[in-house]
Image (cartoon, rainbow, N blue to C red):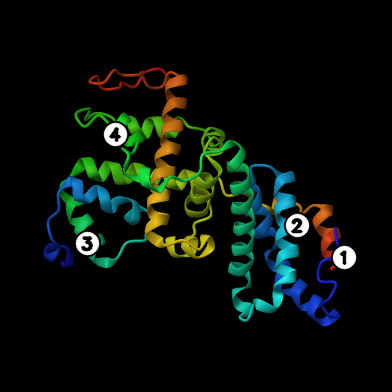
Amino acid sequence: MKNEKAKDIDCREALKLIAAYVDKQDGEHDRQKLEKHLNSCQHCFDRVEFEKLLKSRLGGLKLDTSTMKVSPKIKRLLEDL
Amino acid sequence: MQTPCAEHTAEERKQFKEALLPFLDDLFRVGVELCKSKSEAEELVSETVVRACENFSLLRDRSKAKQWLLRILTNVFINKCRKKSIRNEVQYDESSDDEQQFSLFDELSQPFFWWGNPEREVMNRFLDEDLRRALSALPEQSRSIVVMCDVEGYTYEEIAELLNTPIGTIRSRLSRARSQLQRHLFDHAVDRGWVAKRDERQKRKITNEK
């Protein structure tokens, strides 16, 4: 297992890595360190799940453009180009 | 308003429209998310279209038209925010990024409450409308970064490019904006009676009513 080689980190260090992990913007190295920690820390695991849930709820707010029509004003502007 | 692209040839205008049209909906959607209102988004998109048209010759790689247009839209938006912030908003103060962050999870979680998951329960009570209201309550520059990352799903690198700002600054601004957002959500949960205010030492408890 790759994770077994990852360095042990404490909750304070884990906290610094969580945002990038949830955003999937972390590197392989940080991800392995954090996931190893999450395997043994329920509190940080719950934190990650919570942040993921919040992010997913925000992602659900993305507007559906199929229900939005570009206004006549912009259409006119394009016609004038 | 003066007709944009007046000095461009018919062929150039045609090419511009072809580059723009596939992404007009995206521009409008992001515009509404940033501005909070369709009328303001119209203004923003209109100004973006004019600027883009004027600078179309600078777009060398047409495959990057979407990013290029979004960058212009974001810049126009940020400039509007800057003008507004001079009047009535607090601008980013990077020096205060180290101030203590607010975490909704820290406020809600009860590690010894093994038979439930209070933070998830509260999160599930929030309606989309509550989330939108919390987003709307953020200062415009904070809102824009949360919209880009969490609503629109841009990477840090893309946001850094759009805002022409270093990635490290994006990370710290995002962290701060999320902290503000979570504070608004927490206040809302308190107002609704979903969580009790605690004094400095007392843990907040989730009310049992639903």
Name the kind of residue labelled 4 in the image.
Answer: Asp
Secondary structure at badge 2 equals: helix
- N-terminal of the pair, mark 3 or mark 1, is 3
Image side of residue B149 versus residue B88, left or right: left
Image side of residue B12 versus residue B99, left or right: right
Q: Which residue in the protein does label 4 denote?
A: B106
Determine the residue positioned at 33% across, 39% down: B101
Q: Is residue B33 visible?
A: no
Can you give x and y, in whole percent of width and height, for residue B49 in the image? 73, 63
Tag 1 subunit = A
Q: Are marks 4 and 2 in contact (CB under 8 Å)?
A: no
- N-terminal of the pair, mark 4 or mark 2, is 2
Determine the residue positioned at 60% across, 57% down: B74
Cα–Cα span, label 4 and label 2: 43 Å
Residue B27 sits in which quadrant?
bottom right
Tag 4 subunit = B
Label disc, if present, on residue A32 of the rendered structure: 3
Name the kind of residue labelled 2 in the image.
Answer: Ser
Label disc, if present, on residue B46 of the rendered structure: 2
Label disc, if present, on residue A80 of the rendered structure: 1
Cα–Cα span, label 2 and label 3: 46 Å
Q: Are marks 2 and 3 in contact (CB under 8 Å)?
A: no
Cα–Cα span, label 1 and label 2: 12 Å
Tag 3 subunit = A
| Disc 4 versus disc 2: nearer the observer | 2
